[in-house]
Amino acid sequence: MIKRRLNELDLLRFLAAMAVVFFHYAFRGYAKGDMSEMPYPLLAEPAKYGYLGVELFFMISGFVILMTASSNNLKAFFISRVVRLCPAFWVCCTLTFLITLAIGQPKYSATVYQYLINMTFLSDLTGVLPIDGVYWSLFVEIQFYLMISIVLGLRKIEKIETCLVLWLMISATAEILGFEKLRSILITDYAAYFTAGATFYLVWAKGFTKTRVALLAGALALACYTAIAWAQLLEPKYSTQYDPLIVCSIIVVFFAAFFLIATNRTGTVGTLNWTVLGALTYPLYLLHQMIGFMIFNIAYPAVNPHLVLWGTLALMISTSYIIHKDIEVPFASLLKKSLSQSFTRVKTWL
């Protein structure tokens, strides 16, 4: 049976991105006092939970990456990830760097060396500061890609369910007992979300089993545990309080949404085309934070904060669409062709 395209994932991507945008614009930028000069109290209280949009991204990634890897083709998987990550990142990183040089002072600065290292995706490994703080989640994604690549390289993708069980169990143990080395290597802070997304893909593709139900229950429990722990760390940082019940309720909503998707119960939402929203999500995520804050710091308080925030949001969305349509799509096509040809040449030489 041919499975339909999951339009709902595009909508979820956009909602996750918007949650993060509002977290930054309406709360985080001003809350710590080190990013933005402009408060936005109208939305600050609900927006402070918007950081959980990143966790939703990781669930989506777990679903989509396992779908991509299910062909058991390491070369195709590698090409798809490079094509997906690199073009938009290179463009957005370059824009952020140039705009930082132009209007970032005195709060923001960047160097050519920092920019070049960022363009290689190696800033986290080399200890170089990211051009934009949101890049941290890309390094988490890349770690997940590497883990899936190892499974593909060993030709064990059919054993992925066993791998997910082991990952979840080790992650829960490392989180509870504080095994820092394991926590770093196995990205245990976010293992629950990747595992949940991947398990929901298996449910969508093959149906429920006792193991999959247990995986989802364990992932939900670990996700709530790590989310509450992280919220407690954020409270002194931002001088606010997070309600554990709200945090867990948001995560339950994420799981409920994926349950509806995996069991084809999304109704009209699943029949609508959300492709455009999904497509602009990645450049929007990469662009919005630092550039937005720089605009806030220049415009506020001379310009009405409502106009500044919503005008900046409109600018970021429209710019993201242009980047996707006029740069990312054609560049990605050329990159995919180039990588495919390179792999063919290497295979011929070997």
Image (cartoon, rainbow, N blue to C red):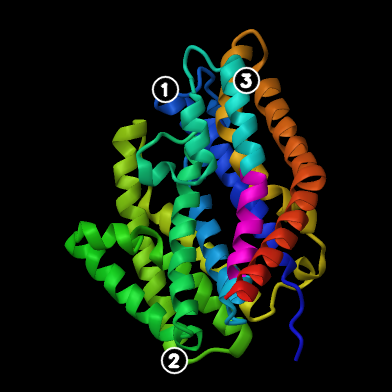
- Direction from residue 70 to residue 325 in the image, left or right: right
**Label 3 residue SS:** helix
The answer to which image quadrant residue 187 occupies is bottom left
Q: Tell me how far mark 2 sits from mark 1, CA to CA.
A: 48 Å
Q: Are marks 2 and 1 in contact (CB under 8 Å)?
A: no
The amino acid marked with disc number 3 is: Ile
CA neighbours of label 1 inside 10 A, class few (<14), some (14 to 19), many (20+): few
Q: Position of residue 91 (x, y in %)?
A: 67, 39
- Residue shown at 57%/18% (left/top)? 101
Establish if 59 lies above or below 199.
above
**Label 1 residue SS:** loop
The answer to which image quadrant residue 284 occupies is top right
Q: Tell me how far mark 2 sits from mark 3, CA to CA.
A: 52 Å
According to the picture, the residue beneath numbered tag 1 turns out to be 34
| Residue 310 visible within the image | yes
Establish if 156 lies above or below 91.
below
**Which circle, 2 or 1, is nearer the viewer?**
1
Q: Are marks 2 and 3 in contact (CB under 8 Å)?
A: no
In the rendered view of the protein, which quadrant contains the N terminus? bottom right
| Majority secondary structure in the magenta region | helix
The amino acid marked with disc number 2 is: Lys
Nearer to us in this view, 166 or 33: 166
CA neighbours of label 3 inside 10 A, class few (<14), some (14 to 19), many (20+): some
Q: Position of residue 21 (x, y in %)?
A: 59, 39
The answer to which image quadrant residue 83 occupies is bottom right
Q: Which residues are magenta?
A: 77-89
Residue 210: numbered disc: 2
**Label 2 residue SS:** helix
According to the picture, the residue beneath numbered tag 3 turns out to be 295
The amino acid marked with disc number 1 is: Asp
Residue ranking furthest to the top: 302
